[in-house]
């Protein structure tokens, strides 16, 4: 394939190197074309130029700019992206691992507001009931991610997770239910709609 | 611990059984106390009653009702939850694996709007640059989840994921970037703030 890589960061640079090594034609594009050319010079089969040149070159275009620059960048490129496959690998991460775009609350936070005085901990939402008595997958205890704002409450819940045989994985404050609720939906998407079935579970794998 | 389980579903029923087997005192609570008592009768060390009774009983209270009933249920319980640890395991899932609460758009969808005519695919956002050249974790290819609305574009991206040595995992339409962007933030939370370090990656493990 012909691949245009927009942005001269570590992600785009490494992916460009890997794809060039697989025989793809890679062109780096940067606001500073000299930087893109220098990046390309170290990779056989790669070239460099402006953002617009790299976008025009690619059958597939990788958007590798900082997330706050993404909308401005694609607007700048304009019609050259028409019909192209555009890979978005940006993450709209705000302060404290919050999501800066489109995520404003969670079920757990709403429950905490309604249950005044309760120490709400989000947990077990990513585990299908059919898996509860079989926590080990491929030799690993599957993860139960949990989050909350009260340390004592979280310690109790961690023990209750241990008691089920799953791996308790502490995931920060209650607002991170905005991260854990989507994870359950991803599991449902993969299990029910993408053919993986329900006998699968997420794990943060170590090296 | 004394654990109150609100709702008589499969999740709560199974967790109650597992926790009772570990020596915890479990009380099931349901809008139909007879149903909760019948559920408890099969489990040594468990009892059953009304929702309010189970909430009053528990040092830890598990909220195991359907998500649409969660707010109403905790409001109904009221002051009995004050100071208690409340486990929220509900998932606010709407039609087509959408999130019904607090999630209204994603960076990828905003980019697709700005890059008119481009076939946007969300991918690689959950992989730290330092992992790109080392895709295998604990003997497994780590997952690269991707989503988009154009089948041909997704096929190209899947091939590019294969070319990096990662496992391409198809995750539905572009709006599911609302699920994949939070997953990257969860990785950042665990890697940077919860001590797991950056040499970890998510995998949907098979049995």
Image (cartoon, coloured by chain):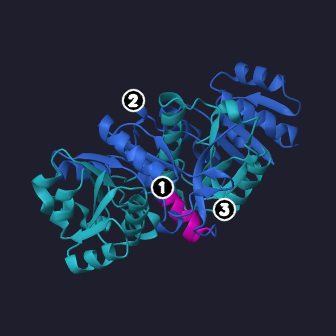
Chain colours: A blue, B cyan
Q: Which residue is nearer to you in this view: A193 or B59?
A: B59
Disc 1: which residue? A164
For the question of whether residue B23 can be seen, the reply is: yes
**Of pointers 2 and 1, the one earlier in the residue sequence:** 2
The picture places residue B22, in percent across and down from the top left corner, at 43, 56
Q: Which residue is nearer to you in this view: B205 or A21?
A: B205
Do tag 2 and tag 3 residues touch (Cβ < 8 Å)? no
Can you tell which quarter of the image residue B56 is in?
bottom left
Give the crowd class for mark 3: few <14, some 14-19, many >=20 residues within 10 Å.
some
Give the crowd class for mark 1: few <14, some 14-19, many >=20 residues within 10 Å.
many
Q: Secondary structure at mark 3?
A: loop
Which residue is painted at 49% across and 65% down in the image?
Answer: A128
Q: Is residue B154 above or below residue B28?
A: above
Q: What segment is highlighted magenta in the picture?
A: A185-194
Q: Is residue B47 above or below residue B190?
A: below
The picture places residue B27, in percent across and down from the top left corner, at 27, 64
Q: Main secondary structure of the magenta part?
A: helix
The picture places residue A191, in percent across and down from the top left corner, at 57, 66
Q: Which mark is residue B207?
A: 3
Give the chain of mark 2.
Answer: A
Disc 2: which residue? A95
Q: Is residue B153 above or below residue A8?
A: below
Do tag 2 and tag 1 residues touch (Cβ < 8 Å)? no
Gap in Å between the C-alphas at discs 1 and 3? Answer: 17 Å
Gap in Å between the C-alphas at discs 2 and 1? Answer: 34 Å
Q: Which mark is residue A154?
A: none
The picture places residue B173, in percent across and down from the top left corner, at 55, 62
Can you tell which quarter of the image residue A107 is in?
bottom left
Q: Is residue B133 above or below residue A120?
A: above
Q: Quadrant of the C terminus of chain A?
A: top right
Which residue is painted at 56% across and 58% down in the image?
Answer: A135
């Amino acid at each position: 394939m012909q691949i245009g890589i927009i942005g001269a960061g570590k992600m785009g640079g490494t992916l460009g190197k890997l794809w060039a090594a697989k025989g793809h034609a890679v062109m780096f594009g940067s606001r500073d074309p000299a930087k893109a050319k220098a990046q390309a010079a170290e990779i056989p089969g790669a070239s460099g130029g402006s953002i617009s040149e790299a976008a025009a070159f690619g059958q597939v275009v990788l958007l590798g700019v900082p997330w706050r620059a993404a909308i401005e960048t694609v607007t700048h490129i304009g019609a050259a992206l028409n019909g192209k496959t555009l890979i978005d690998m940006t993450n709209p991460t705000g302060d404290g691992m919050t999501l800066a775009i489109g995520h404003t609350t969670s079920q757990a936070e709403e429950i905490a507001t309604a249950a005044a005085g309760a120490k709400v901990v989000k947990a077990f939402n990513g585990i299908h009931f059919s898996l509860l008595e079989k926590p080990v997958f491929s030799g690993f205890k599957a993860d139960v991610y949990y989050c909350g704002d009260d340390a004592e409450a979280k310690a109790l819940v961690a023990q209750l997770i241990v008691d089920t045989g799953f791996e308790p994985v502490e995931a920060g404050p209650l607002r991170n239910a905005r991260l854990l609720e989507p994870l359950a939906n991803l599991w449902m998407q993969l299990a029910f709609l993408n053919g993986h079935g329900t006998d699968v579970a997420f794990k943060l794998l170590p090296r």
